[in-house]
Image (spheres, helix red, strand yellow):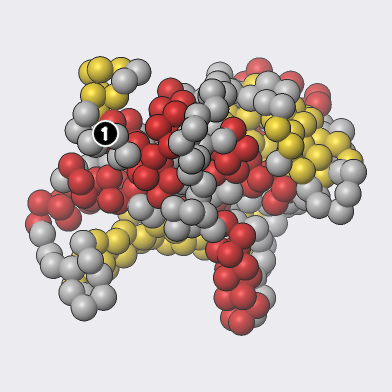
Amino acid sequence: MTEETDEEGLTYAETGVDIEESEAATAALIGAVGEFEGDYAGLVDIGDRYLALAADGVGTKLLVAEAIDDYSTIGIDCMAMNVNDLVAQGVEPVAFVDYLAVEEPDDDTAEEIGEGLREGAQRASVALIGGETAVMPDVIKGLDIAGTCAGLAPKDALFPGEAEPGDAIVGWPSSGIHSNGLTLAREAVTRDHEYTDPFPHDSDRTIAEELLEPTRIYTDVLASLRAHETHAAAHVTGGGWTNLTRMGDYHYDIADPFDAQSVFEFVQQEGSVSDEEMHRTFNMGTGFVATMPEADAESVVETEDDARIIGEVNEAENEDGTVSIRGLEL
């Protein structure tokens, strides 16, 4: 994607986020607390349905918002990171609560975050039923925002969660960088730029505005996925394209991914980041995928305006799942 340079290329781990260590810590936590059903959400059997709960935050995207003192879109990201995880399991999100932890209270900042949460709730068609604000100057520097989303699913509506060899892979485009990999992106773009500088690919926007483009919410694709034989789905978040292996240890051959938005080219160029590292960190233009038989995939594509078949699932050559995309083997 980019020309090699003499400057040392950045990696996500070197900027402070090691995906393998993070996943190991998560596994240790889950192992300590006991049973946990589902790859993206916890499931509670309530009779004829499952109650699902997902919790997530916005990560260091908050630091971009802090740098330009604009938190108006952060609430959308917080909502998206939670509801998209529920959709990936076949669950309909229904209600959301937020948790805002601050070093010191600020009415204007809280109002901006609240406006984003309301907008996100409208986009996701969920009820925003309250939350909590904690003032903790000894713990928090600045602020952190997280949330929990509850969803419901009939037992026969959940996706099995395991792809099958021969499945087609349907994809939907992302809206940009979403809310993952910002630690790497921030380090890259601030090497020689300020957040308030014009974005080189669109002088009407600043670099910060491009990084803060809200995460797309995918609740609108759930009905179509449920109406077809969807085997598994993945929200392409932390870990980038390696997220697809959460659908099973297969080989995911991506022949026709969506084009990566210009923000990715900018981050890669400014940070001298390798193609492989970019695809292991970012969504690179595709934010959500699902696997299903080819006939179902073709039907979904006919009903979803911006969906398309981007690849296929094959047997893996070894015990671990792999992804091939744009000449890379991940």
Is 8 situated left or right of 114 in this image?
right
287 lies above or below 48: above
Residue 209 x/y as whole percent: 27, 32
- The disc labelled 1 sits on which kind of residue? His
Residue found 21% across the figure and 62% down from its top: 142
Mark 1 lies on a secondary structure that is loop
Seen as rendered, the residue at the extreme left is 107
Residue 121 x/y as whole percent: 35, 45
Residue found 41% across the figure and 27% down from its top: 266
On the image, numbered disc 1 is attached to which residue?
Answer: 193
Residue 256 x/y as whole percent: 68, 21
Q: Nearer the viewer, residue 253 or 290?
A: 253
Q: Quadrant of residue 236?
A: top right
Residue found 52% across the figure and 63% down from its top: 53
Q: Is there any visible trace of residue 77 in the rendered image?
A: no
Is 155 situated left or right of 23 in this image?
right
172 lies above or below 31: above
Is 233 situated left or right of 208 in this image?
right
Q: Nearer the viewer, residue 297 or 309?
A: 309
Is 134 situated left or right of 161 in this image?
left
Q: Quadrant of the C terminus?
A: top right
Q: Nearer the viewer, residue 69 or 326?
A: 326
